[in-house]
Image: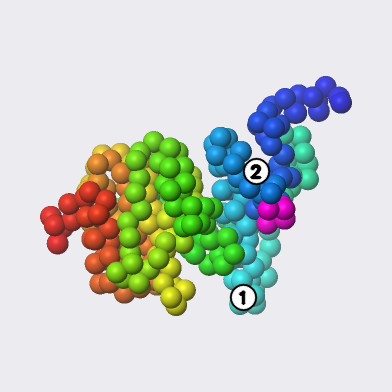
């Protein structure tokens, strides 16, 4: 091993934690045997940095798939120009993959980028992030969540620990939606949780939860195409319920969710 290679190895966060980037990539691509997958998921619970990297991989994969679907319906050629860049961890092949994925992700999210960074719309970032997370993960058929509803107790314990707040999962059974499961996501200033629900027709709703600063607590609507997100802040926690259903029905469900989670929606009606 050369001095440069040794230096890169020492500062590689995955090497430091004993996790291989290739194993993380194989996890995202569903290429690991079930026993290895279960063992790696267990290790990720103790390694927030690696877990965040896996979440990034999954978001990029979903964005690339969305880009491919968009290109299939777009006759105009899409060109990505990459500039040479020395990878900070010393693995040129992996660095190139990250550059391609990042550029593709930028193209995929370009139409909603102004909303993501504010764009003068005034919506808080967590509502925009919730909308984007909905758009990225709800089309997934095989891996829409990290932890399935069959492990609900583990899911709640895990996400509560990561968000440093006792969480609960509201029931939407009376509206015909059952819990699919949930996942950990990067938030604006820390981790965020996404819980996904599905009805018998396959339509999905998501509840996004994250810590947020004090501020506006009113019940508000954020809209992007046929997607709608009702969002609110309660006890320094931001909540956002997203879905493509009618505005009136989504509002009714969101108000019930807010009440079940300890909010005071009666002041907003």
Q: Is residue 189 visible?
A: no
- Secondary structure state at the residue bearing disc 2: helix
The image quarter in which residue 140 lies: bottom right
Name the residue at 64% across, 68% down.
Answer: 68
- Residue placed most toward the observer, 139 or 5: 139
Residue 33 is a magenta residue = yes
User: Image check: 141 left or right of 182?
Assistant: right
Instruction: Count neighbours of disc 1 (C-alpha within 10 A) and say few if under 14, some if 14 to 19, many if 20 or more.
Output: few
* Residue positioned most to the top: 3
* Residue 164 % position (x, y): 39, 36
Which tag, 1 or 2, sits closer to the chain's start? 2
Q: How is the image coloured?
A: rainbow
User: Image check: 33 left or right of 146?
Assistant: right
The image quarter in which residue 85 lies: top right
From the image, which quarter does the C terminus lie in?
A: bottom left
In this view, the mark in front (1 or 2)? 2
Residue 111 lies, with reference to residue 101, above or below; the image says: below
* Residue 50 % position (x, y): 60, 39
Q: Which mark is residue 39?
A: 2
Span of residues in magenta: 30-34
What residue sits right under mark 1 in the picture? Answer: 74
- Cα separation, mark 1 vs mark 2, equals 42 Å
- Secondary structure state at the residue bearing disc 1: loop
Disc 1 to disc 2: CB gap under 8 Å? no
- Residue placed most toward the observer, 144 or 77: 144
Q: Main secondary structure of the magenta part?
A: loop
Name the residue at 62% across, 57% down.
Answer: 61
């Amino acid at each position: 091993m050369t001095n440069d290679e040794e230096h890169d190895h020492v500062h590689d966060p995955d090497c430091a934690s004993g996790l291989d980037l290739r194993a993380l990539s194989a996890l995202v691509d569903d290429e690991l045997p079930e026993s290895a997958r279960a063992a790696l998921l267990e290790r990720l619970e103790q390694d927030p940095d690696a877990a965040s990297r896996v979440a990034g991989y999954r978001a990029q994969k979903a964005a690339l798939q969305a880009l491919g679907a968009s290109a299939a319906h777009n006759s105009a050629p899409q060109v990505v120009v990459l500039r040479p860049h020395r990878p900070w961890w010393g693995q040129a092949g992996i660095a190139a993959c990250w550059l391609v994925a990042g550029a593709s992700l930028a193209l995929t999210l370009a139409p909603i980028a102004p909303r993501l960074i504010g764009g003068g719309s005034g919506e808080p970032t967590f509502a925009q992030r919730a909308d984007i997370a909905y758009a990225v993960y709800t089309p997934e058929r095989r891996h829409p969540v990290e932890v399935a509803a069959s492990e609900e107790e583990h899911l709640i314990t895990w996400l509560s620990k990561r968000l440093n707040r006792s969480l609960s999962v509201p029931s939407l059974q009376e509206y015909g939606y059952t819990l699919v499961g949930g996942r950990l996501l990067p938030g604006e200033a820390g981790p965020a949780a996404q819980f996904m629900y599905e009805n018998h027709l396959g339509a999905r709703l998501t509840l996004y939860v994250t810590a947020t600063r004090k501020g506006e607590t009113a019940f508000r609507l954020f809209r992007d195409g046929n997607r709608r997100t009702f969002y609110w802040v309660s006890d320094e926690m931001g909540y956002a319920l997203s879905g493509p259903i009618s505005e009136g029905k989504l509002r009714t469900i969101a108000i019930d969710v807010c009440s079940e989670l300890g909010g005071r929606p009666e002041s907003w009606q």
